Amino acid sequence: MNSFLLQVVTMSAPLLLLAMAGYASERSGVINIGLEGKMLTACFVCAAFAPQFGAIGGVVMAILAGIVISMLHWTLTQVYRIDHIVSGMAINLLASGGTGFLEASGFAKNTLTEAQRLPLWFYYAVALLAPFLLFWAANHTRFGLQHKSVGSDPSKARLLGINPQRIRLLALTLTGVFSGLAGSLLVSETSTFTKDMTAGRGYIALAALILGGWRPIPAALSCLLFGLATAVQIQLSGKPMFGMQIPSEIWKMLPYIVTLLALAGLLGRNRTPAGLGKH
C-alpha cells in the first residue's frame, strides 16, 4: 500500500508543479499552452548545469531558464500582442527543437549522480504544499486579489489603479519558478535528459487546471486523479483480467481516458476566467 501511494505521488508531483505554473499564468489572464516547452527547457538546463554547479546550482539554473522562457511569453503576448496560443505553440516547438539539437550535439549527456540531484522528498513536499499556499495567497494577500482581478476583467482592474501588465509579469515569473522545479524534478527522477522527455505533461497539467476550474486545490486533485490512474495502470499492466491477457497498450491509455472522461463530464460547468486572453 505504501509503495502504491508513493507511486501515485511520483506520477502526480511533476503535474502538480506544472499545474500551479499554469494557474499563476492563466488566472492572471495569460493563456499558457507553452507549459510543455517551459518544463522541457528546465529539464535540459538542469541536466546540463547540475554536473558543474551541483544540485542546488542545477535547480537554480533550471528555474532561471523557466523564468526567461516565461518572460519571452509575456513579451510576445503583452507587449507585441501576439495571440497567446500561437506564442505558446512557438515556445513548445522552439524548446523541443532546440533541446533536441543541443542534446544531439553532446550537451546534457551526463548521468547525474546522487550528489548532483536534490532529494525527491523536497520536490514532493513543494508539490503537495504549493496548491494550499497559492489558495491562501489568492484570498489573503494584496497580490493574490489583484491577480484574480486582472484575470477576471483587466479593463475594470485598470479603473481600480491596477496595472495588468505588471501583475501578469509577476504571475509569469511565478510560472517560471514552478516550471523550473517541475523540470528539475523530472531530471532528478530519471538522472538524465532525453529528447522530449516531458512526454505531454504540459498538456496534461493544463487539462488538470481546466478540470479544476482554474482553482489551485481542485486542479491539484485533478493531477492526483491522473497520478492515481497512472499508478493503477502500472500495477495492472501485464496481468490477466477475467481470464484474458489485456495488451499493455490498453492499460497505457487508462490515465488519458480517465482525464478525458472527467473533462467531458465537467465541460461547460467550470467558469473560464473572463479576462483570459484579453489585454
Image (cartoon, rainbow, N blue to C red):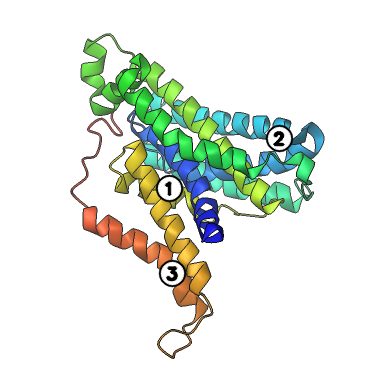
Res. 34 in view: no
For the residue marked with disc 1, what is the amino acid? Ala
Residue linked to disc 3: 253
Is 161 left or right of 21, judged from the image as shown? left
Q: Position of residue 62 (x, y in %)?
A: 64, 35
- Gap between marks 3 and 1 measured at Cα: 17 Å
First in residue order: circle 2 vs circle 1: 2
**As drawn, which residue projects farthest toward the top?**
161
Res. 246 in view: yes
Q: In the depicted view, which residue is nearer to us: 211 or 79?
A: 211
Is 277 left or right of 67, judged from the image as shown? left
Is 102 left or right of 247, judged from the image as shown? right
Labels 2 & 1 near each other (Cβ < 8 A): no
- Gap between marks 2 and 1 measured at Cα: 23 Å
Q: Position of residue 147 (x, y in %)?
A: 33, 23
Q: Position of residue 48 (x, y in %)?
A: 74, 41
**Residue depicted at x 47% and y 35%:** 129
Numbered disc 1: secondary structure: helix
Q: Residues within 10 Å of mark 3 (few under 14, many from 20)?
A: few
Which disc, if any, is residue 58? 2
Q: Residues within 10 Å of mark 1 (few under 14, many from 20)?
A: many
Q: Is residue 198 above or below residue 217?
A: below
**Residue depicted at x 33% and y 19%:** 140
For the residue marked with disc 2, what is the amino acid? Gly
Res 243 → quadrant: bottom left
Numbered disc 2: secondary structure: helix
- Gap between marks 3 and 2 measured at Cα: 33 Å
Residue linked to disc 1: 205
For the residue marked with disc 3, what is the amino acid? Met
Which disc, if any, is residue 265? none
